[in-house]
């Protein structure tokens, strides 16, 4: 980034911070704070091991320093400003989840538009929240658009604060269905003196697999027998014989599927359940960034600040507002709306922001400031000299 571009962005970030009031997280005085300034050259410098007392008044600090990126720790410490981690005195930590479009299965940043990546990431966020709210029954959740390519979720329930890395790893494994054991999704119940094995349909992965089983069985019933048999044989571990057994079981006792009874069709249905469990595990997981969740000392972006790689606001989102949240509109800083600036770029580029589609071509372009800031922050344009 050249000096003119860096100075322009630094100045406009400062203007943004002078126009807003930031809301620190709970227990802000117990957290470590860090930021990345607008360092000349291609490198970056992380300033960390600061406490809230080192920063002083939060709004004044950001107005005066206008950092490129800003963070606080998920952890709470006795002495958050200590110069080494060993001296800080760890107390507890929020449980933090990070979803990044760059890491989503099937998303290629080279061929996927920014809007498409954010849409895919929001779908993954919905799945993650299903796990956190339904499976774990967490209540104190804060959802945040990262300002870049994804979302963060901060869980601050008392029950998670003192979990160590290994315990957090177990939560990660559950959410990502790592080593999902189909056997644990099935339990034995006694009915009229007879034992039978059924899927755990009351919640969790058992309920997800059961829903997939019911839907799959309904689809098979709409097919002719030959097509249904061929579909079954496409699943791992199901040959012609087992396919026939499954179809026979579905025909004889259609209610068994809705009960989650895996005994009615013998080993054929149990194999079907295992195959569907593998399919559900591949499609219904939330592809979180594992090290973020297991790290009890992680620094995470400060909501309300600007993301130095996009110029968008790291935006907290009320749970009821999530469905209607559009990061390409709602995270655009109002400070950067209403004026145009001149930029220079080497390539053709189209930006969709704030409800507008802005195209640039090689050379000098006059664009809405929010689009110019976005391109400059991403290193795809530079500030043009004034004429």
Image (cartoon, helix red, strand yellow):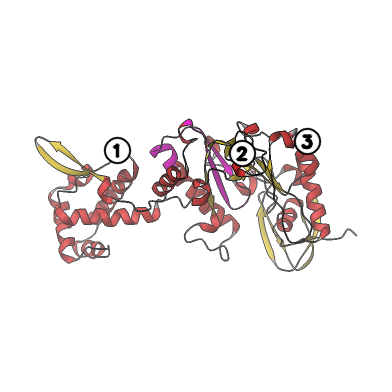
> Where 232 sits versus 310, above or below?
below
Q: Is residue 114 magenta?
A: no
Residue at screen point 60% across, 39% down: 316
Q: Secondary structure at mark 2?
A: helix
Q: Is residue 40 left or right of residue 286?
A: right
Q: Residue at x 15, y 52 (%)?
A: 265
Q: Nearer the viewer, residue 351 or 63?
A: 63
Q: Can you tell which of label 1 and label 2 is closer to the viewer?
A: 2
Is 138 inside the magenta-drawn segment?
yes
Residue range in magenta is 130-158
Q: Residue furthest front?
A: 87
- Across and down, in percent, residue 134 comes to 40, 38
7 relative position to 261: left or right: right
The mark nearer the N terminus, 1 or 2, is 2
Q: Secondary structure at mark 3?
A: helix
The residue carrying mark 3 is 60
Occupied quadrant, residue 206: top left
Where does the image place residue 74, in percent across and percent down from the top left? 57, 40
Q: Is residue 338 visible?
A: no
Residue extending furthest left?
193
* Between discs 1 and 3, the one toward the N terminus: 3
Count neighbours of disc 2 (C-alpha within 10 A) and say few if under 14, some if 14 to 19, many if 20 or more. Answer: some
Between 76 and 252, the residue placed more toward the observer is 76
Res. 345 image quadrant: bottom right
Q: CA distance from mark 2 to mark 3?
A: 25 Å
The residue that mark 1 highlights is: 202
Q: Which circle's residue, 2 or 3, is located before the other in the chain?
A: 3
Mark 1 or 3: in front is: 3
Residue 114 visible, this orientation: yes
Q: Which residue is mark 2?
A: 88
Nearer to us in this view, 5 or 27: 27
């Amino acid at each position: 980034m050249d000096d003119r571009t860096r100075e322009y962005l630094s100045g406009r970030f400062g203007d943004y911070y002078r126009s807003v009031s930031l809301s620190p997280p709970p227990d802000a005085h117990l957290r470590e704070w860090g930021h990345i300034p607008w360092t000349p050259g291609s490198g970056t410098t992380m300033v960390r091991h600061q406490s809230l007392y080192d920063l002083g008044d939060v709004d004044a600090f950001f107005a005066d320093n206008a950092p490129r990126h800003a963070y606080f720790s998920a952890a709470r410490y006795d002495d958050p400003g200590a110069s080494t981690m060993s001296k800080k005195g760890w107390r507890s930590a929020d449980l933090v989840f990070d979803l990044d479009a760059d890491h989503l299965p099937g998303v290629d940043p080279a061929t996927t538009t920014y809007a498409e990546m954010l849409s895919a990431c929001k779908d993954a966020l919905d799945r993650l929240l299903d796990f956190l709210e339904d499976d774990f029954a967490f209540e104190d959740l804060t959802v945040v658009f990262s300002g870049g390519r994804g979302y963060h979720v901060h869980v601050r329930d008392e029950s998670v604060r003192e979990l160590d890395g290994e315990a957090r790893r177990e939560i990660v494994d559950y959410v990502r269905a790592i080593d999902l054991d189909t056997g644990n999704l099935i339990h034995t119940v006694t009915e009229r003196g007879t034992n039978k094995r059924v899927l755990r349909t009351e919640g969790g992965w058992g309920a997800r697999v059961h829903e997939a089983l019911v839907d799959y069985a309904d689809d098979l019933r709409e097919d002719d027998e030959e097509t249904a048999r061929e579909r079954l044989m496409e699943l791992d571990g199901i040959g012609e014989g087992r396919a026939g057994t499954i179809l026979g079981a579905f025909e004889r006792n259609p209610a068994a599927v809705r009960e989650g009874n895996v005994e009615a069709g013998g080993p054929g249905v149990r194999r079907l359940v295992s195959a569907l469990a593998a399919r559900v595990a591949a499609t219904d997981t939330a592809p979180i960034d594992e090290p973020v969740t297991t790290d009890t000392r992680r620094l995470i972006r400060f909501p309300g600040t600007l993301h130095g790689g996009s110029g968008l606001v790291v935006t907290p989102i009320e749970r009821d507002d999530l469905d209607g949240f559009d990061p390409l509109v709602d995270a655009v800083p109002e400070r950067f709306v209403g004026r145009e600036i001149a930029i220079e770029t080497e390539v053709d580029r189209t930006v969709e922001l704030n409800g507008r589609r802005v195209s640039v071509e090689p050379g000098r372009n006059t664009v809405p400031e929010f689009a110019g800031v976005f391109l400059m922050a991403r290193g795809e344009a530079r500030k043009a000299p004034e004429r």
